[in-house]
């Protein structure tokens, strides 16, 4: 990441760094999550279907997301600790970081559903609003057509806004349409293997996938080691928090 890119992150609340991972690395990660997803879908009970299934796919059951691949899947544990990625994360939130929570987003072709405008920090309730950065890794190329992220530039420097949820989707916390519609949103396509970094306060959303292509991604939510989810809006499992580096170790190596 160049000094200009870091300055853009501070100003806009997000920045995209292409080419952090190779096509081969992303293909191996995709193979792993598709195998994991098949196992998970086969065992999914009725109570969890609304949370994990993509409601945009009406012709078949398709997963919308899975949680904490960094903890459950060795492939993603290695990705989360990859030095190329950690160098970028630590340049944004300082030395000594952990993954507090992570997600796989599937967004399948021809119907993968949207995610309304929201802020990660509303979900997470961190004790340090600047201590959280999401590394959103494009396992497939993310385009405007297949549902890339859109960001509200500069909203990282504003407040955490109130969120609401539809009555039938209490987990789908989002900024009310009357507020969200007044906030300009910038598309942020990411090439396969690239990473989009965004601040926990940055407003963002994704659209649905009407293309014939997948838009699979892994979101790793990094925190500085002094940061915790103090007042989360949803429940998060502290047992899966994974420390990646210590500040002293990075400093000892000149990092």
Image (spheres, rainbow, N blue to C red):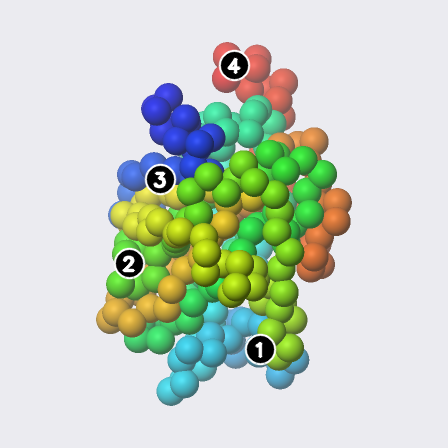
Q: Work out how far the residue at label 3 is from the one at label 1, CA to CA, in angstroms.
A: 31 Å
Q: Name the quarter where the N terminus is drawn.
A: top left
Under tag 1, what secondary structure?
helix
Graded by Cα atoms within 10 Å as few (under 14), some (14 to 19) or many (20 or more), the crowding at tag 2 reads: some
Give the x, y percent position of residue 101.
60, 50
In this rendering, the label closer to the viewer, 2 or 4: 2
Q: Work out how far the residue at label 2 is from the one at label 1, CA to CA, in angstroms.
A: 26 Å
Graded by Cα atoms within 10 Å as few (under 14), some (14 to 19) or many (20 or more), the crowding at tag 3 reads: many
At horizontal 37% and vertical 68% (from top left) the residue drawn is: 208
Give the x, y percent position of residue 239.
71, 50
The reply to whether residue 179 is in sight is yes
User: Nearer the N terminus, badge 3 or badge 4?
Assistant: 3
At horizontal 37% and vertical 21% (from top left) the residue drawn is: 3
**In this image, 97 relative to 1: left or right?**
right
Q: Quadrant of residue 128?
A: top right
Which residue is identified by label 1? 50
Which residue is identified by label 4? 253
At horizontal 55% and vertical 29% (from top left) the residue drawn is: 93
Give the x, y percent position of residue 241.
66, 45
Q: Work out how far the residue at label 1 is from the one at label 4, CA to CA, in angstroms.
A: 47 Å
At horizontal 52% and vertical 14% (from top left) the residue drawn is: 253
Which residue is identified by label 3? 16
Under tag 3, what secondary structure?
strand
Q: Are marks 2 and 4 in contact (CB under 8 Å)?
A: no
Give the x, y percent position of residue 94.
56, 25
Q: Work out how far the residue at label 2 is from the one at label 4, CA to CA, in angstroms.
A: 40 Å
Which residue is identified by label 2? 144
**In this image, 75 relative to 21: left or right?**
right
Asked if residue 255 is positioned above or below residue 231 in the image, the reply reads above
């Amino acid at each position: 990441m160049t000094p200009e890119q870091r300055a853009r992150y501070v100003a806009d609340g997000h920045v995209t760094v292409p080419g952090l991972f190779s096509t081969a690395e992303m293909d191996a990660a995709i193979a792993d999550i598709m195998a994991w997803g098949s196992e998970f879908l086969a065992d999914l009970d009725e109570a969890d279907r609304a949370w994990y299934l993509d409601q945009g796919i009406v012709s078949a059951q398709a997963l919308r997301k899975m949680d904490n691949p960094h903890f459950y899947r060795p492939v993603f544990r290695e990705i989360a600790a990859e030095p190329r990625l950690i160098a970028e994360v630590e340049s944004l939130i300082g030395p000594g970081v952990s993954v507090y929570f992570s997600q796989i987003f599937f967004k399948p072709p021809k119907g993968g559903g949207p995610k309304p405008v929201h802020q990660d920090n509303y979900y997470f309730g961190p004790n340090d609003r600047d201590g959280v950065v999401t590394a959103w890794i494009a396992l497939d190329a993310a385009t405007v057509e297949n549902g890339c992220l859109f960001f509200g530039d500069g909203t990282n420097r504003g407040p955490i806004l109130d969120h609401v949820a539809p009555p039938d989707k209490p987990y789908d916390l989002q900024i009310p349409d009357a507020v969200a519609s007044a906030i300009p949103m910038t598309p942020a396509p990411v090439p396969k293997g690239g990473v989009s970094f965004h601040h926990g306060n940055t407003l963002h959303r994704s659209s649905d996938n009407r293309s014939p292509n997948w838009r699979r991604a892994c979101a790793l939510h990094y925190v500085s080691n002094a940061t915790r989810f103090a007042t989360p809006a949803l429940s998060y499992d502290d047992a899966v928090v994974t420390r990646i580096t210590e500040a002293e170790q990075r400093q000892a190596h000149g990092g």
